[in-house]
Image: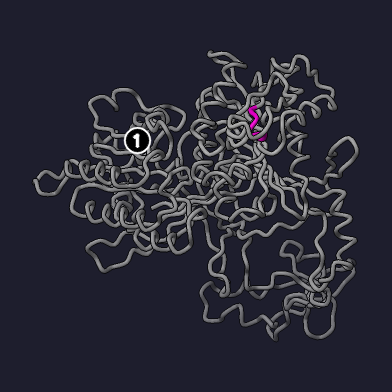
Amino acid sequence: MVMEDPEAPHHMLLIRNFMSQGLVHKQPLLYASPAKDPRGFLGTLPSPMFSKDEKSRDRDAEQEKGLRIAWQYKKYFGEQNSEFQRDGKSEYCNDFDLRKPLERHFYSGQQIDCISLQDSADLTTFQDCCSSFLSQTSRNDRNITCAGRIAIQSLGAPQCDFSDKECDMLSFIRSLKSTIRSSNAVAVITFPPSLVSPAFSKRLQHLADTLVSVKAIPDEDKELAKLLTGYQDMVGLLSVHKVARINTQVPTILEATTFSMKLQKRRSLILECLNQAPVDGSTGSSYASSGSCSGSSKTGSLDF
Amino acid sequence: MAERICRALRDGVLEGEHAPALTIKDSIQSPFGFLVFNHVLSQLSSFIVAQKSQSQGIVLVALSRGPLYYEELFKSKGNDVSSSNKWIRVLDCCTDPLGWRSKLMESGRIANLTLGTSTTASLYKNAKDLDKLLLAITELGKELVGDGKGRFAVAIDSVSEMLRHTSISSVAGLLSNLRSHDQVSCLFWLLHSDIHETKATAALEYISSMQASAEPRTRPVNGQRGNYEKLPFLEQNLRGGKIHVRFKRRNGRVRLMSEEFCIEQSGIKFTPISSEAEMMARSLVPKVQFNLQLSEKERNDREKVVLPFEHQGNGKTIQIYDGRKSLNEDKPEMQYTSAEKVQTVKDSGRGEIIYFRDSDDEMPDSDEDPDDDLDI
C-alpha cells in the first residue's frame, strides 16, 4: 500500500513503474482508478531502458575482472539489489525511461483490464472483477511462471460515491487480500490518508503487507537545500514503514527507511538513501544528512 | 504572486494533462474571497479579450451572485460588455437554482417576472443534479469555442453554494471531470472554508493544483476575549489581509508564497509582504541533541587555550623547530638537552657554531625510543 501526499503525484510514478514492469514480464494486469477513462493512463506508462544497461554491464565485466568475487558477494547483501545474473538472462527489475512511452508491442496480446471507480455506487462489481481476474492466476495449477498484477489508484478519492462508506472499503480490502494470498498475484493500492478518517487510515495501514508513503517537498526552500545534498534534483521523499513478512518470523531490518526520489537526467526514477540525524526522543525520527557523509553513495531500486 | 496565479490560469493546460485548478478560500475572519475571485475573473477576461490566453472564453457558473452583478463588474473594470457574448457565458444558478420559482409561476401563484437578464446568461434550474450541470457547462463552452480544438475556462462562483445542494463526492466528481475534459483550459472556484467539514475542504484541496487562502493580517492574542478589546484587530482585518498561495508544481514540489492585500475603492490591491517572512513550521528540519553552537564566553576561552606543543612549560616563548634551518638559526627549546648532546651556542649570527647531532650516532632500531626525549 502506498500512502499518498495530497500535494504531489509521486504515487503515480510508483504505479507507472509497477504496471510497466508487469507488461514487460508479460503478466496480466488489472488497473482501477477514479478517472472516467482509465485506459488513457496506459499511454503514460514508461518504456524500459534495456540496451544501454547491457552495454554498460559488458564494459564493467571487462574492467572489473579483478573485482568479480566482490560483485558476486554484493549480490547477496542488501535486499535492494536486483537479482540479475551476470549473463543478463533473467531480470526482475528494470529501469524505466519516463520520457519515452511504452512501445506498442508490449500491449499487444496482453490481458489488461481497466476499471473506472467513479460511477459505481459501491465496490461489489469491482470486487467481482478482481475475483474473476485472480481466478486466472490461482495457485492450484503447478504453473507458477505467470503472476498477475493489480494496481488500484487512489482508493477513497472523493470523486467516488463509496468514499464515505469506510466499512465497505475495509471489507473489500480484506477479501482482496485473502484472495491474493491464495493466488499468484500482487496488488499495489494507493490511498490518500489525509482525506479519510484516521481510524480508517490506521486500519488500512495494518492491513498492508508492505507499507510505503510518499511525501512532497517544498520548492526553493533554502534550509532544506542546506541540509540535504542533491536537493535540486529531488522531487520527493519515500518512506518505507513496513516490509512484507510472509511465511517468516525474521523481520527485515532495512539500512534506511527514508529515500529521496530523484529523476536521473529527468528520465528514470531513482531512490537514494538519506542519512538520518540523531533521533529526537520526543518526536521520533527526523531526516537530515550532514555535509560530509551525505547520501548519493548508494542507489537502489525496490523490486516490483 | 497574484499575477502568478493569473498567469498560470492564462497559460492553461498542456496536452494530455489535467487542467490547472485554483481554489480561493476564505473565512469569516477575512471574508475577502469574493474580491479575490473578482480580481482573478477580471484579469483572466482581459487576457481573453486581448487574445493572450489559451482559453478563448469563460463559462461562469453563477451560484451566489446573479448575472447582472457580473455585468456591472465587467463594466466597472472597463471590459467591453457589448461584445461579451463572444467570450463569456453565464450559467445562472442563482435566480432559481431548484426550479421553485418557475413552478410557482406555472401554477400562477406569482406573476411572471421578467428579470433584466443579459443575453449571455442561461437559466439553470437543477442545482441538485450535477451531471446535468456538467452537460450544461460543456454545452455552453462549445457554444463559445466551437467543437474543435478551442478551449474555455470555467469559473464557479461558489462551491460552498453547490455543497448546500449536493454531496462532496458529486462536487468532487464534477470538478475532476471538468479538469480532465478535453476542452477545458483552466478552472477556478471560491470556497468558504469555515462552513464546511474539514473533510470537504481537504477533498477540494486534493483536487485543485493551486490554493489561495485569504487570512487576517493579525490575530487577537489569547486573553483578549471581549469584543471591545478585539476591535483594533477587527478594524485592521477588515481593511486587508494576507493571501497565502500553495502551488503544486508538475515535478511534485510545492511552492509556497504569500502577499498582502488591501481593500480599496476600486477593488483589491496586492503588495509584497512588508514584515519579516513568516517562519513556516518545517517537519523536515532535524532536531539534533548536540549543541553545536558556541557562546561568546566559550569562544573567548577557546582562543585563550595554549596548545601543548606551543609552550615549554617554563614561560619561554614559542618556537617551533623547522628541520631545514638547523645550522644558523637558534635551536628550538623543544629539543631539549641531555648530557650526551653538545650544547649549542645561542648566537645571533657571528662566529662559528659547531654542532654534533646526537641522532646521527644512533643506529636505526636502537633500543632507545627517540620519543623518550620529548618533554611535553
Q: Which residue is mark 1?
A: A20
Q: Is residue B323 left or right of residue B16?
A: right
> In this view of the protein, which residue sits in the foreground, B285 or B239?
B239
Tell me the quarter of the image containing the N terminus of chain B: top right
Q: Is residue A141 left or right of residue B88?
A: left
> In this view of the protein, which residue sits in the foreground, A111 or A171?
A171
Q: Is residue A287 left or right of residue B51?
A: left
Q: Residue B173 in the image: state x and y as whole percent.
A: 49, 39
Q: Residue at x 73, y 18 (%)?
A: B84
Q: Is residue B368 magenta?
A: no
Choose top left, top right, bottom left or bottom right for residue B67.
top right
Residue type, label 1:
Ser
Q: Say few, some or many: other residues with alpha carbon within 10 Å of mark 1 (under 14 / 14 to 19 / 20 or more).
A: many
Choose top left, top right, bottom left or bottom right for residue B222.
bottom right
The magenta stretch is B91-96
For the question of whether residue A297 can be seen, the reply is no
* Magenta span: chief secondary structure: loop
Identify the element where label 1 is drawn. Answer: helix
Position above or below: B106 against B302: above
